[in-house]
Image: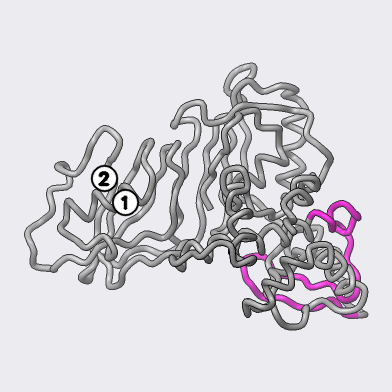
Amino acid sequence: MSLLPQLLSKPEAWLWGKPTSAARIRELPSDFCVEEILGFEPDGEGEHVFVLIQKTGENTEWVARQLAKFTGTNPRDIGYAGKKDRHAITQQWFSFKHPIKAPPIRWSLFETSTIKVLQHTRHGRKLKTGVLQGNRFELLLRNVTEPLALVERFKHIQKDGVPNYFGEQRFGQAYGNITQGEALLAGVLKERQSHKRGLYISALRSALFNQIVSERVHHRRWETVQVGDVLMLAGSQSCFVMEQGMTDVADRLATGELSHTAPMWGVGELMTQGPSADFERSIANEWKGWADALETLGLRQERRRARLMPEFAELNQVTEDQFRVTFSLPAGSFATSVLRELCLVENSQQVELAE
């Protein structure tokens, strides 16, 4: 039995209730800019060329194919840290193996009206998927209603962050990845490509995570901490279990030094204890078909932070009904999680904001 109707009937909770402001985003590619943050500097030496490319209205895979064709590289050997949205202006690094003594590459011949080479250097290793610190976003909000409410809402986000929900692009257009994931579990879909199988299963796991975080918000367990909760340190994946006598945890939670966590469901014992574990199990039982399948597939229990704290967050008014919002997010998080807490996005099409 499909759990998709149940999912559609239980949208994720807002931290401060449904926003009263509304806005349109991404009317033009320049309304949505993303700058990749690698987290390291290429060392300038080695057999791999690193090139920083700004693309407008093009997706990452297409640019990678064009780069492979231009440099005579096997497309599989083009490296990049993550995929970026097509309907935007984005800056990201690509890499490919190229002999050190080869003639210099004339990058001007690669550039087009939608592709610009901003920087190129060398490094000792290929750029691999996931090897990035995060992304910096600069978004223009148009046709903003209730601007004063928008400003107040943004102040809350700066101070307390937002629920770290997986964004809608994880689930595909019209929740297609959820549908495919359920078909895969039922044996109806025979998907040979491993990355697609992983995508569909990840959608189910991510949806279950979102529901557990949403219930924590709904039951007002966001700002409080109790014995048995699992907390994660800011800037790391290090976790610990709240124990009796830990007197400073609530203060550290309030300042953003700590975050609650929620399970990425799989086989094994929950890290939470006592009533906290009972709370998470009770929610998972509402999605028992998915939870059981994730365990059967052998995915291990993991923890993901429940709160997302945007860094360097700023909101500036451009015109009476336009605001520019900028912030940086760590890898694996979604700008849609910030936007949905700030305002209602009125664009009808799915907004695919980069991870």
Amino acid type of the residue tagged 1 in the rendering: Leu
Residue ranking furthest to the front: 188
x then y, percent, for residue 337: 66, 47
Cβ atoms at labels 2 and 1 below 8 Å apart: yes
Q: Answer with the quarter of the image where residue 114 lies.
A: top left
Give the residue at x 24% y 59%.
121
x then y, percent, for residue 97: 21, 67
- Name the element at disc 1: strand
Q: Is residue 334 above or below residue 253?
A: above
Q: Is residue 223 magenta?
A: yes
Report the residue marked by disc 1. Answer: 52
- Name the element at disc 2: strand
Q: Nearer the viewer, residue 56 or 161?
A: 56
Magenta stretch, overall SS: loop
Give the residue at x 56% y 49%.
328
Boundaries of the magenta span: 214-243
Q: Residues within 10 Å of mark 2 (few under 14, many from 20)?
A: some
Q: Is residue 352 above or below residue 188?
A: above
The CA distance from mark 2 to mark 1 is 6 Å
Q: Nearer the viewer, residue 105 or 44?
A: 105
* Side of 350 relative to 40 (left or right): right
Q: Nearer the viewer, residue 211 or 88?
A: 211
Q: Residues within 10 Å of mark 1 (few under 14, many from 20)?
A: some
* Side of 42 relative to 259 (left or right): left
Q: Answer with the quarter of the image where residue 245 lies.
A: bottom right
Report the residue marked by disc 2. Answer: 117
